[in-house]
Amino acid sequence: MTALTKADPPQAVPDRTAPMVQVRGLHKSFGPLEVLRGVDLDVPAGSVTVVLGPSGSGKSTLLRAINHLEKLDHGYVAIDGELIGYRRSGDRLYELKEREVLRQRTGIGFVFQNFNLFPHLTVLENLVEAPIAALGRPRAEARAAARALLERVGLADKAAAYPRQLSGGQQQRVAIARALALEPKVLLFDEPTSALDPELVGEVLDVIKDLARSGTTMIVVTHEIGFAREVADTVVFMDGGVVVEQGPPDEVLDRPRHERTRVFLAKVL
């Protein structure tokens, strides 16, 4: 059971005028270490938000909190007006049963640093299983959709391959296609190129850029400043578990207001 913060969470009925993703007053600690210290964030539908910051700033924990892989100490997350991981009863939040959380996660695609593909399944099978199990799709329909997604990420010829037979860049493109297979409302990327050899980074970023042009709502944690400048609608700079500043890329990257942001960018640009 979690007490409400001052910012009351929305009711269960979706508010179509609200941002696609609402984060309010997020706090998360691991023992004595406070990793998130009151994070607020709005992500409009169809927009791309890029989150930058040094290691340990809370970026990955924020993503994991959004799809309830990390339980919150305080605050709430809502996607398309629906509370994630909790239900409201009076002035309290009660954690949902795992089955209901899993249902909610079908609407939140998550692309990890290290691909997390099933090694014993072919590329096509990696894409097919979740739509069948979670959405009840007929197998033939799921396979047809999976082949279309593999075509979209440039891997139509790899449907019968196993993950071990692919390069890191190809595995990450499969992971993106797998996230898209559930037709999520929002896609979360946790440093999707950090585990790749430098020459493979571009092929993954090109797929993400294509998704951005198609209007997919995305939150991308990355160190790729050039990508942020080209693709982001909003750049968020985090440090010490808080949002230090946020705004359009040309403002945050070229004219940062906060000294901490300026110091960070001077080291990475």
Image (cartoon, rainbow, N blue to C red):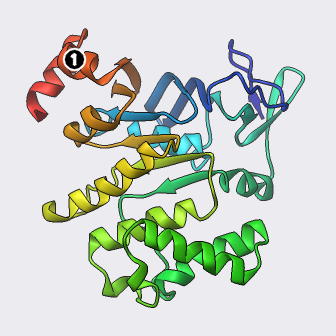
Is 263 placed above or below 95 here? above
Image quarter (top left, top right, bottom left or bottom right) of the C terminus: top left
| Image position, residue 248 (x, y; %) | 34, 20
| Image position, residue 267 (x, y; %) | 9, 31
Q: Could you tell whether 234 is left or right of 222 in the image?
A: right
Question: Which SS class for mark 1?
Answer: helix
| Image position, residue 27 (x, y; %) | 54, 27
Q: Could you tell whether 111 is left or right of 227 in the image?
A: right
Is 65 placed above or below 153 here? above
Q: Could you tell whether 123 is left or right of 232 in the image?
A: right
Q: Using the rendered image of the protein, determine whether residue 240 is visible from the camera's viewpoint.
A: no
- Name the quadrant containing residue 224: top left
Is 252 placed above or below 71 here? above
Instruction: Look at 62% across and 32% down and name the residue there.
Output: 20
Q: Using the rendered image of the protein, determine whether residue 21 is visible from the camera's viewpoint.
A: yes
Depth order, front residue of 29/137: 137
| Mark 1, other Cα within 10 Å: few <14 / some 14–19 / many ≥20 | some
Image quarter (top left, top right, bottom left or bottom right) of the N terminus: top right
Instruction: Look at 62% across and 78% down and name the residue there.
Output: 144
- Name the quadrant containing residue 86: top right
Q: Which residue is mark 1?
A: 260
Is 25 placed above or below 219 here? above
